[in-house]
Image (cartoon, helix red, strand yellow):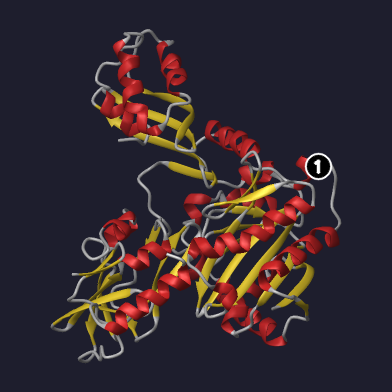
Amino acid sequence: VRVFDLGRVPWLESQLLYHAMPRVGVEGLVILAPAEPYVCIGRHQDPFQEIDLEACRRRGLPVFRREVGGGAVYLDGAQVFFQVVLHRDSPAARGGTEALYRRMLAPVAAAYGDLGVPSRYRPVNDVVTTDGRKVSGTGAAEIGDFIVLVGNLIEDFDYDTMVSVLRVPDEKFRGKVYRSMHENLTTLRRETGRSFAWGEMTGALVRRFAEELGPLEPAALPAEVRAEAARLEPVLTGPEWFARAGRRTSVEREVRIAGDVQLTQRVHKAPGGLVRSIVEVKDARVVHVSLSGDFFCYPGEGLAGLEDALAGTPLARLEQALASFFAAGRLVVPGVGIPDWLAVLGAA
Amino acid sequence: MAAIGKWEFPDDLAYTAEHVWVRVEGTTATVGLSAFGTELSGQIVFVEAPRVGRAVAVGEPFMSLESGKWVGRIKSPVAGTIAEANEELEWESATVNADPYGKGWLAKITLADPPDLSGLMKPGTPAFEAFIAAERQKYGT
């Protein structure tokens, strides 16, 4: 397998090259970083739902839809990207989705360890520190007869910009996304307190990938890949590709922070009025709940008691937690029953 | 209904090597992902339905699925025109995993010509059983 260490490249090349390689039959491991920041959305996302496009325009951030899955991400030069392109019949591409993620992300976890941040692969597609915080964004796609798996080593991360470009229902939700992201996503610099040279990060990646892919031969990127990237550019930056409709959801807004952490806003119309929730869930357990809406309740401060009572509850036990809370008589909400609370909490 | 391991393969369907099933009734072919195919994919979180009226060729990718940030493509086992897409799956993608041969069907294709299914596999045959055995070894299932 050849390795193409391209250093810093124009932001658009950081996406187009790995889209071009399978189309011209070139396998390899690409390592690069974008010279300019940009926002990238997943293959099946709706940009108008996910991204505050006006905020991106004000900040001068291009927005690109990739063929790879996953969610919206802010990408910049403080992240080193790895892009593995393999023919589906290649011995290195054996196994199903989870097997391939496991084999391709184990080297990434090992590279983090080499750089001073002990990490591990966590199914299906996360690389996390030993205490479970995400350190790498990853995704994959089948393009023609090839499999493309991409991800990054995150030296540093601009949480503020990431959160500011997401489309959210209100600033309260945005604040919760920021807090959850800061708690559940970390970086090399945050963990070690130092910066890293290019060669140090890419050296660890290449060394560890070689243990899985076999000897990696440094090579120049074939000219036909660049030619194909140039041909693809108008297609993958064109309005038809960008504006494709995306995933549909019955929730108001959902942001997945990491594989096992998500923040959701829901609205439910109960007989007693409209109930709104923001729920953070981690490992199928409620972390925080905020409740509001247009309904009567007494005593007024009882709602905070309900929020406190639900924090830490496994999703599977929400119904019991609600029943015991309301049985204690600490809060009365006419016209909002347990099925309504379960609906607005996403556990109906 | 043939069963290999924990996976069922209805006898009246034909299967591609990419785990797509097809049922031909008159001039319409219904296609879906086999139970084994859903096992390899993992939990499917999104189905992008194909556009009705689109022409498809044998082996041509015509729609995509996403699971675990993985985007997979479905290749058509027959040539024709998309007559109907299961748009319910755009809201309830988990149906593909839960009921791959029923409510989880993916698309209906109006056939251009009587299809040549001779290249597809039928359950209960030694060739099919050998193929699934090889796939289980390849994918470690």
Q: Label 1 belongs to which residue?
A: A192
Numbered disc 1: what chain? A
Q: Residue at x 13, y 83 (%)?
A: B26
Determine the residue positioned at 31% across, 8% down.
Answer: A329
Residue B54 in view (yes/no): no
Q: Quadrant of residue A158?
A: top right
- Residue B50 image point, x, y percent: 34, 71
How crowded pointer 1 is (Cα within 10 Å; few <14, some 14-19, many 20+) is rated as few
User: In the figure, is residue B117 to the left or right of A186?
Assistant: left
Quarter the C terminus of chain B occupies: bottom left
Confirm whether residue B96 shows in the render: yes
Q: Position of residue A138 (x, y in %)?
A: 60, 58
Q: Position of residue B35 (x, y in %)?
A: 31, 65
> Within the image, what quadrant is residue A203 found in?
bottom right
| Residue A318 drawn above or below residue A193 | above
| Rendered position, A179 above or below B61 | above
Residue type (three-letter) at the residue carrying disc 1 = Thr
Residue A81 vs residue A326: left or right? right
Q: Residue at the left extreme?
A: B26
Position of residue B127 in the picture relative to residue A96 (left or right): left
Q: Quadrant of residue A159?
A: top right
Indicate the quadrant containing the N terminus of chain B: top left, top right, bottom left or bottom right. bottom left
Q: Is residue A117 left or right of residue A180?
A: right
Camera-nearest residue between A297 and A194 = A194
Q: Secondary structure at mark 1?
A: helix
Say if B3 sits above or below A247 in the image: below
Q: State the residue at coordinates (60%, 85%).
A: A24
Place of residue A311 in the rendered image (x, y in percent of width and height, measured from the top left): 47, 24
